[in-house]
Image (tube, grey):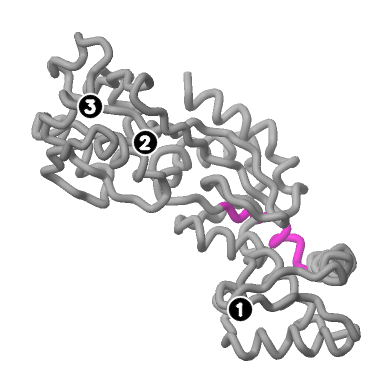
Amino acid sequence: MNIDNLEAFMYVVHLKSIHKASKALFLSQPTVTARIKSLERELNSELFIRQGRNLVLSSQGKEFIPYAQQILQTLREGKRQLKHQGAQNEIVIGANVITSQYFIPHALTSWKKEHPQLHFKFTATTNDELITKLLNHQVNFAFMRAIRDEGINQEPVLDNSVRLIVYPDHPFIQKQNVTVKELAKESIVFFECGAFDWDLIYKLFEVEEIEPNIEFKVDHLEIAKSLIINKQSIGFLPYLCVKEELEKGELFEVDTTHLLQIKQNVYLSYVENDTVNLLRSSIEESVKQFYT
C-alpha cells in the first residue's frame, strides 16, 4: 500500500479540503485527488462522497481512518528510532503571534531551567500554519486558538479574553455599566486580527444602530497599546498583550460584561502526547508563574 496515498487521505480527513491538504503537502490539487482515487481503487471502496465542491467521508472512509492512522503512526515511530540521539533531545514548539510575543519568552526560560539537557526550537506563525505543522509533525506541540480537528488534541492553558482597555485617568474607570452610546462617542483604536471574533464588537454597535468612532485601525498590538497609553484612543484588546501594563497601572480595564463577553483561550495543541507529558509539569508551572 502506497504511504503517500494514505498520507493524502489523512490530510484531507483532517483539513476537510483537498485544497488545504494540497497546500499542507506542497502538492497540486490534481496530485492529491489522484492519490485519493488511487487509494480508493486499491481498497475497492469509495472513501469520500463528493457533494459539489465538498468532500464528505463515506461510511467506508470512516471505518478506514483508524487503520490508516495506525500504519502512518508505525512508520513515524520507526523513523524516530532511526534518528540520532541528539535529535531526540530537540523539542520543537510553535505558537501564534500573540502567544509568541507575550508568553513564550517567559515559558522557554522556565522550561530550559528545568530541563537543561533539552534543546528547544521555536517557531511563530499563524494558526492555520500551526495546524499544518502539527499534522506534518514539524512541531511537537503548539499554543494556538481553538480548532475543530479530530487529529489534534487541545487543552486550554491561557486566558486571552478580549477586554475594553483605557488609559489611567479615563472617566470610564469610575463609571459603572458603560453604555454603547457612551462607547460610540469615544475615539476607538481597532486592532484587526483574524484570530478573534471581532464581529461581536461590531455587532454591539449595530444592534443599537450606532456608528462607532473608530479613528484608528491597526494590525499590531503594540501600536494599539501605544495609542491608548498616549490617550489617543481606547480599545478592545486581548488580555495577554496588556497583562503587564494592567499590573503596573499603566492601563486599566473597564468592565463591559453587561454588554458583551469575548472569552478566548490559548490552547496547548498536539497530535502525540509523549513530549507534552514529558514537559507537562513544566508547562503547568510556567503558566502558574506567568499569572502570579
Query: What residue is rendered at 65% in x and 44% in y?
Result: 154
Viewed as shown, does residue 46 lie left or right of 119? right
Q: Which residue is mark 2?
A: 238
Q: Which residue is mark 1?
A: 52
Bin the neighbour count of mark 1 within 10 Å (Cα to Cα): few under 14, some 14-19, many 20 and up: few
Is label 2 in contact with label 1 (beta carbons under 8 Å)? no
Q: Which residue is mark 3?
A: 180
Q: Is residue 47 magenta?
A: no
Q: CA distance from mark 2 to mark 1?
A: 39 Å
Q: CA distance from mark 2 to mark 3?
A: 20 Å
The secondary element bearing badge 1 is classed as: loop
Query: What residue is rendered at 88% in x and 88% in y?
Result: 42
Compared with residue 236, is residue 92 higher up or lower down, i.e. above or below?
below
Spot occupied by residue 98 in the image (x, y as percentages of width and height): 40, 45
Q: Nearer the viewer, residue 236 or 158?
A: 236
Q: CA distance from mark 3 to mark 1?
A: 43 Å
Q: Nearer the viewer, residue 29 or 219?
A: 29
Q: Is residue 91 magenta?
A: yes
Bin the neighbour count of mark 3 within 10 Å (Cα to Cα): few under 14, some 14-19, many 20 and up: some
In the figure, residue 175 lies in which quadrant? Answer: top left
Query: What residue is rendered at 28% in x and 43% in y?
Result: 221
In the figure, residue 155 lies in which quadrant? Answer: top right
The secondary element bearing badge 2 is classed as: strand
The magenta region covers 83-93
User: In the rendered image, which quarter contains the N terminus?
Assistant: bottom right
Q: Nearer the viewer, residue 222 or 193?
A: 193
- Indicate the amino acid at tag 1: Gly
The mark lying in front, picked from 2 and 1, is 1
Is label 2 in contact with label 3 (beta carbons under 8 Å)? no
- Indicate the amino acid at tag 3: Val
